[in-house]
C-alpha cells in the first residue's frame, strides 16, 4: 500500500496539474470506487461538475483537494493499487479506469485507476483540524493523527502517548491515530536506522530513543520522496504514470537473508500482524520484554 512518500508524490503532481482548474464533468465507471460517498455515484458526479479545484493537501496516506469556497473537498485514498493519473483526454481508456474527470479548459483530464478497487474517492465536508489550529480537514479523517512531516506534529505528545500505549513500537508506528503515514515498509526502515527492534515495548522507550526514531522516520521518508517513492510493481505510480526508485535503497525491508548494510549480519524476517517484519539481529537485538 502506498505510504506517506508515495501519496506526497501524487499530491505534488496534482498540485501542478489540477490546481485552479474547473471540472466540466465527472464520470463514475465503477460504483465501488465511490462507495463511501453515501449519496451514490450520480450525486458524486453531479456535485463535482462546475467545481474549481484548489491546492491539494495530504495527511498521512490520505490526500484531498479543497473545492471552491473550501467548505468541501474531494477526498482520496489510494488503497492497494489506486492511481490518480493526468493525461490527454483522447488517450485510450485504462483497463481499470474507475472515475474520470474532464476540465472546462479542455486540457489534461484526471483519472482514478484502481485494479483491486480497495481505494476510494468521496466528497466530504471540511471541519476544524484537531491537530493544527486554523486548518481544515475532511470530516471522515478528523481522527487521523498528524504525520511526522507536518509542522503540526507534536513530538513530545507522541512520546507521552508511546509511554501510555503499552504495545510494541512497530505496532504503535502503524497506529494512524497516533502517527499517520507510516506503513510496514517505512516502519521497518526507520526502526533499522534507529537501531530499535520492532517488538520493543513502548512503555520502556526513552525520550531520546523516541526522538531518534522520529528523526529516522523523517530521514527515510524524505529520502524516498526525493526519488519518487517505493514501487515494487506497476500498481504505484505518480500522476504521469512513472514509478519511484526507493526500492533500490531499502536497507532491511524485503532483504531476508541478505547482509545488513551496517554489520553484515543476515537480515531476519519475522511474521507480524499477518505481514512481515524485517530487522538485523545484531543492530536491532530483541528486547527481553518483547511484545509479540
Image (spheres, rainbow, N blue to C red):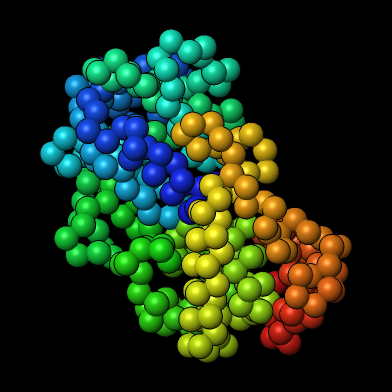
What residue is drawn where x is 29% and y is 39%?
A: 65
What residue is drawn where x is 48% and y is 81%?
A: 211
What residue is drawn where x is 62% and y is 52%?
A: 246
- In the visual, does 174 lie left or right of 280? left
Splitting the image into 4 quarters, where does residue 111 fall?
Answer: top left
Q: Is residue 218 above or below residue 84?
A: below
Q: Looking at the picture, how far across and down is residue 3, in whole percent?
A: 52, 51
Q: Is residue 148 above or below residue 65?
A: below
- In the visual, does 97 lie left or right of 197? left
Q: In the depicted view, which residue is nearer to us: 63 or 85?
A: 85
Q: Looking at the picture, how far across and down is residue 24, in whole percent?
A: 25, 17
Q: In the depicted view, which residue is nearer to us: 141 or 206?
A: 206
What residue is drawn where x is 44% and y is 81%?
A: 159
Q: Looking at the picture, how far across and down is residue 220, in whole percent?
A: 56, 64
Q: For residue 124, say whether it is visible.
A: no
Q: Looking at the picture, how far across and down is residue 284, in whole percent?
A: 72, 79
- In the visual, does 23 lie left or right of 222? left
How many labels were placed on the picture?
0
Q: Is residue 239 above or below residue 185?
A: above
Q: For residue 221, say whether it is visible.
A: yes
The C terminus sits in image quarter: bottom right
Outermost residue, left side: 69
- In the visual, does 185 lie left or right of 57? right
Amino acid at each position: 500500500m502506498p505510504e506517506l512518500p508515495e501519496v506526497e508524490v501524487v499530491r505534488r503532481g496534482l498540485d501542478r496539474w489540477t490546481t485552479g482548474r474547473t471540472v466540466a464533468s465527472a464520470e463514475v465507471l465503477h460504483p465501488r470506487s465511490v462507495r463511501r460517498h453515501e449519496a451514490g455515484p450520480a450525486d458524486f458526479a453531479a456535485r463535482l461538475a462546475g467545481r474549481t479545484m484548489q491546492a491539494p493537501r495530504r495527511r498521512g496516506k490520505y490526500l484531498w483537494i479543497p473545492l471552491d469556497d473550501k467548505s468541501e473537498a474531494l477526498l482520496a485514498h489510494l488503497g492497494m493499487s489506486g492511481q490518480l493519473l493526468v493525461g490527454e483526454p483522447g488517450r485510450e481508456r485504462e483497463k481499470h479506469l474507475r472515475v474520470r474527470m474532464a476540465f472546462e479548459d479542455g486540457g489534461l483530464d484526471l483519472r482514478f485507476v484502481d485494479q483491486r478497487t480497495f481505494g476510494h474517492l468521496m466528497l466530504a465536508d471540511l471541519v476544524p483540524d484537531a491537530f493544527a489550529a486554523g486548518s481544515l480537514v475532511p470530516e471522515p479523517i478528523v481522527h487521523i493523527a498528524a504525520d511526522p512531516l507536518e509542522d503540526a506534529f507534536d513530538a513530545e505528545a507522541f512520546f507521552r502517548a508511546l509511554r501510555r500505549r503499552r504495545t510494541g513500537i512497530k505496532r504503535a508506528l502503524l497506529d494512524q491515530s497516533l502517527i499517520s503515514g507510516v506503513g510496514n515498509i517505512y516502519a521497518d526502515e526507520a526502526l533499522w536506522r534507529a537501531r530499535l527492534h520492532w517488538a520493543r515495548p513502548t512503555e520502556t522507550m526513552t525520550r531520546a530513543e523516541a526522538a531518534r526514531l522520529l528523526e529516522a522516520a523523517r530521514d527515510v521518508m524524505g529520502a524516498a520522496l526525493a526519488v519518487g517513492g517505493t514501487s515494487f510493481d506497476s500498481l504505484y505510480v505518480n500522476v504521469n504514470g512513472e514509478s519511484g526508485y526507493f526500492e533500490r535503497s531499502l536497507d532491511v525491508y524485503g532483504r531476508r537473508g541478505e547482509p545488513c548494510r551496517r554489520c553484515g549480519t543476515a537480515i531476519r524476517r519475522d511474521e507480524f500482524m499477518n505481514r512481515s517484519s524485517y530487522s538485523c539481529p545484531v543492530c536491532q537485538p530483541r528486547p527481553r520484554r518483547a511484545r509479540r
